Image (tube, rainbow, N blue to C red):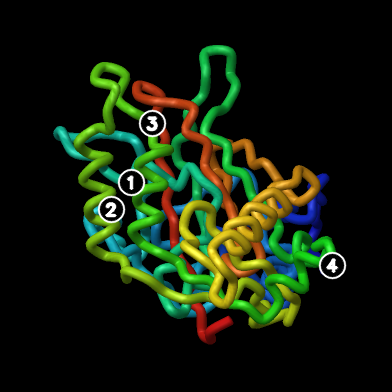
Amino acid sequence: MSIDIRFADAPLGHEIRGVDLSQSIEDATFAEIEAAYDRYGVIVFRDQTLTPDQQIAFSKRFGPLDRYVLERYNLVTHPDIFVVSNVIENGKPIGLADAGRYWHTDMWVKPIPPRGSMLYALEVPVRDDGEPLGDTYFSSMSAAYDALPDWLRERIEGRKAVYSARKNVEYRIANAPVDPATGELSEEAKEGMRERLANMTPEITHALVKHHPRTGRKCIYYSEGAISHIIGLDEKTSDETLEALRQHVLQPRFIYRHRWRIGDLVMWDNCSCIHKATGDFDLPLRRRMHRTTLSASVAV
């Protein structure tokens, strides 16, 4: 029986209905789920009730898992799960509060970045009027590639870009929310930035256009505030090209906005999409999510 897909008004972010991820899924059904994931880049499952073991079991159907580099944010009992949360317990954060409030693809610091991630919502911040906060935006890099103007496609095709750890951290600091009492970054945020820099390769090179390893579809590979320059272009042309690329990939026609509910599990692909978290909430509004990360078997 074919899976039931409710299509979003975007190239990605489609909801798969009628599947209970806590149960064993038949091979034929799983194959359809994986094909939808590969084809669209972001798929959504609503109303799930998952234990850490169940989330890990479903994740491993796709292959081996990667662990988040900052181990203190991994779930102690299940280190394959990375905790995304602003909750403080016993004076310490139980997870990473800053879930990437800028457009990015995960873990570009690795020569072979992970295939993708699954994020499962346990607690979602909600305003007094019932409006959920902390939305996540996704932009389709495959659809954006298909719609490139000829001049920009010719400019980036076959070229590589240098990703800089220091540039990325400086960008994140400049755009991070400050403590309203001091007007500065919190000590926790500063420590997180220092940890990131210590665990990042100073520079790494990626192709600006990659082939999806399973579908073969071309995708733009881009992260905001991370690319220092495009190899083979002078500084002015490189900067102009990166700005044109940023404006192109962030057009509304490529973007899906996910409004979280408790029990949502969202999967995204790191080659065919970029994403951005919305930091429009703070304690006492709580956010707690569990993320698993799918390893990539080949470079793209």
Sequence-first disc among 2 and 1: 2
Residue 15 visible from this viewpoint: no
Mark-to-mark CA distance, 1 and 4: 40 Å
In front of the other: 170 or 115: 170
Looking at the rendered structure, the kind of residue marked 2 is: Tyr
Mark 2 secondary-structure assignment: helix
**Whole-percent x, y for residue 4 in the image:** 80, 57
| Residue at (40% x, 62% y) in the render | 53
| Residue holding disc 3 | 177
Instruction: Between label 4 and label 2, give the one nearer the viewer.
Output: 4
Looking at the rendered structure, the kind of residue marked 3 is: Pro
Give the answer, above or below, for where 70 lies relative to 29.
above
Instruction: Between label 1 and label 4, give the one nearer the viewer.
Output: 4
Sequence-first disc among 1 and 4: 1
Mark-to-mark CA distance, 2 and 1: 6 Å
| Residue holding disc 1 | 96
| Residue at (73% x, 82% y) in the render | 216
In front of the other: 148 or 232: 232
Residue 239 visible from this viewpoint: yes
Q: Is residue 4 left or right of residue 26?
A: right
Using a 10 Å C-alpha cutoff, classify the residue at mark 2 as few (fewer than 14 neighbours), some (14 to 19) or many (20 or more). some
Which corner quadrant of the image does residue 70 belong to?
bottom left
Looking at the rendered structure, the kind of residue marked 1 is: Leu
Sequence-first disc among 1 and 3: 1
**Whole-percent x, y for residue 298 in the image:** 53, 86
| Residue holding disc 4 | 150
Mark-to-mark CA distance, 3 and 4: 38 Å
Q: Marks 3 and 1: in contact by CB < 8 Å?
A: no
Instruction: Work out which quarter of the rendered image holds the C terminus and state it.
Output: bottom right
Residue 73 image label: 2
**Whole-percent x, y for residue 66 in the image:** 39, 72
